[in-house]
Image: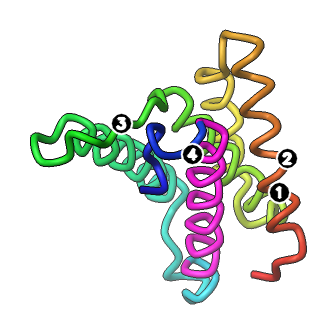
Amino acid sequence: MFLDTDFNSIKSVLNNIYQNFAESAMKYYRYVKSMQVGKQPRAALLIETLESMTDMAFVLVKAKDRSQTSQEYACAVSKRQMQWLALTAFENVLGRKQTRFQPVLAWVRKALEEVRPKDKRDALRLMKVAQKGQAVFRGFKY
């Protein structure tokens, strides 16, 4: 229901996606931080996890969209939008803790360039979603 663009505005759905990824980024950070320094995963594994998570999120959203049992469901979010929101959420969360995540952040910033919205209106809408999301999570300690 939170991702259904027939039920919610596209803006609300994009906000929900961003907030879910921001929360995932905070959990990601806490999980890595909870490990002993010698036992923490390498940056490559963290990057692979992030890629897999965004791909799986999109597949799950679209699979429900095509499902025979959910004829009333539709999600008009593109893969590029989903990736941009996920990467931006992780950049915003991990950017606050950047000394530990420099290789991951470098990869995120490069990946953001690749999925940057081509349409100016879409880019502006996504930027507003990210700014609103940042405002929601700004006071959070993690």
Within 10 Å of disc 3 (Cα), the crowding (few <14, some 14-19, many 20+) is some
Quadrant of image for the N terminus: bottom left
Q: Secondary structure at mark 3?
A: loop
Give coordinates of residue 123: x percent, y percent: 74, 22
Residue ID for mark 1: 134
Q: Nearer the viewer, mark 1 or mark 4?
A: 4
Q: Residue at x 70, y 60 (%)?
A: 101
Residue ID for mark 4: 13
Residue ID for mark 3: 74
Spatial separation of the CA atoms under disc 1 and disc 2:
5 Å
Q: Nearer the viewer, mark 4 or mark 2?
A: 4
Spatial separation of the CA atoms under disc 1 and disc 4:
16 Å
23 over 61 or under it: above or below? below
Residue sticking out furthest to the top: 119
- Give yes or no for residue 21 being in the magenta stretch: yes
Residue sticking out furthest to the left: 68
State yes or no: discs 1 and 2 in contact (Cβ < 8 Å): yes
Residue ID for mark 2: 131
Q: Is residue 92 left or right of residue 122?
A: right
